[in-house]
């Protein structure tokens, strides 16, 4: 009997979707030497944590037996795992400060050009904006030189021919550094999946989760679309960044200021068929 034979009819399309989204994750795990045994233990941990903390049990704490029935995890493993603290992965220090500095860099007319692109900044300046002043506006607990050295290590920024600091992209995007990349992988993909899962479970008003998807394109056409996606997408991100920064400063210290938002952007370019999962059947799809 195959694994699919044990599933109820409503669960089959959902499991098929999860199987598809897990393929790039498993490919990444294999490339980093993370095998099935480690992932099996991790899944047990997550299943138990979600059943205990995230599933509505009518205000009652679910028993080990109840969690075991809900998740399929053996009772002895439930007992062992349920006492574990929920892991809150903090952002690496380079991201915590770096992302804030870049957000301010991109939100000010003094540090961007007429098209909203970040200007190269001098390290220090007697008047006008400078990199050191920008870092100090976010935190005085870290030396601007340390931030700059870390950015150059991560490929976030570079020194131009005049010795000014220039961003490599219009965002805080580490090109190197596994810890930093892994943090964004966990946060951004988790938030994207959470929004989609919220909509599938029909929990309240639908959240924004849309895409434009076409197949049957040449590589040249895909390249043109990638350039257009980055250009138009960055316009939306920059506009929302400016608005969010203004609102965050306005809300600072106010009661109820406990909400977090994440608005993302991605572009995928790959073959029209997915090995082992079948091909997309529509040559052209409208925004969905």
Image (tube, rainbow, N blue to C red):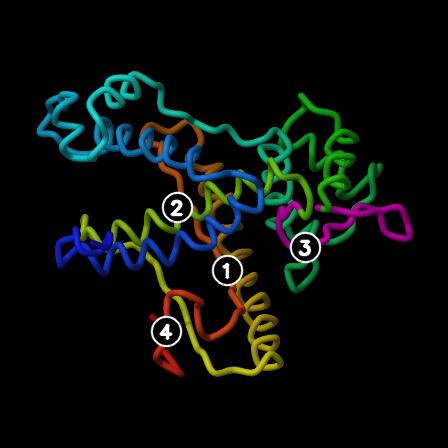
The residue tagged 3 is 169
Please determine whether, in this image, residue 267 is positioned above or below residue 252: below
Q: Secondary structure at mark 1?
A: loop
Q: Secondary structure at mark 3?
A: loop
Report the magenta stretch's main SS. Answer: loop
The residue tagged 2 is 191
The residue tagged 1 is 266
Q: Left or right of 222: which side holds 7?
A: left
Q: Position of residue 288 (x, y in %)?
A: 33, 70
User: What range of the chain is rendered magenta?
Assistant: 156-174
Work out how far the residue at label 3 is from the one at label 2, CA to CA, in angstroms.
Answer: 23 Å
Work out how far the residue at label 3 is from the one at label 4, CA to CA, in angstroms.
Answer: 27 Å
Label 4 or label 1, whichever comes before in sequence order: 1
Q: Secondary structure at mark 2?
A: helix
Label 2 or label 4, whichever comes before in sequence order: 2
The foreground one among 41 and 242 is: 41
Q: Secondary structure at mark 4?
A: loop
- Outermost right residue: 162
Residue 129, by quadrant, is top right
Single out the mark in the foreground, 1 or 3: 1
């Amino acid at each position: 009997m195959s694994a699919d034979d044990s599933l109820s009819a409503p669960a089959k399309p959902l499991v098929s979707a999860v199987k598809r989204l897990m393929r790039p994750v498993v490919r990444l795990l294999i490339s980093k030497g993370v095998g099935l045994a480690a992932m099996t233990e991790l899944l047990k941990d997550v299943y138990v944590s979600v059943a205990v903390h995230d599933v509505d049990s009518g205000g009652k704490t679910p028993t080990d037996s109840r969690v075991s029935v809900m998740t399929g995890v053996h009772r002895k493993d439930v007992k062992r795992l349920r006492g574990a603290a929920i892991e809150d992965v903090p952002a690496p220090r380079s991201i915590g400060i770096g992302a804030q500095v870049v957000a301010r860099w991109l939100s000010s007319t003094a540090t961007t050009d007429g098209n909203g692109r970040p200007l190269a900044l001098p390290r220090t300046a007697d008047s006008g904006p400078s990199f050191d002043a920008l870092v100090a506006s976010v935190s005085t607990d870290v030396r601007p030189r340390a931030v700059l050295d870390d950015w150059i290590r991560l490929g976030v920024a570079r020194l131009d021919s005049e010795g000014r600091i220039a961003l490599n992209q219009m965002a805080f995007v580490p090109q190197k550094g596994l810890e930093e990349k892994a943090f964004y992988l966990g946060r951004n993909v988790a938030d994207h999946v959470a929004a989609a899962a919220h909509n599938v479970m029909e929990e309240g008003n639908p959240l924004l989760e849309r895409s434009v998807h076409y197949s049957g394109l040449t590589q040249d056409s895909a390249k043109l679309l990638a350039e257009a996606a980055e250009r138009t997408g960055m316009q939306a991100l920059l506009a929302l960044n400016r608005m969010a920064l203004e609102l965050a400063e306005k809300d600072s210290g106010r009661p109820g200021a406990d909400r977090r938002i994440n608005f993302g952007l991605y572009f995928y370019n790959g073959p029209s068929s997915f090995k082992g999962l079948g091909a997309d059947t529509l040559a052209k799809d409208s925004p969905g």
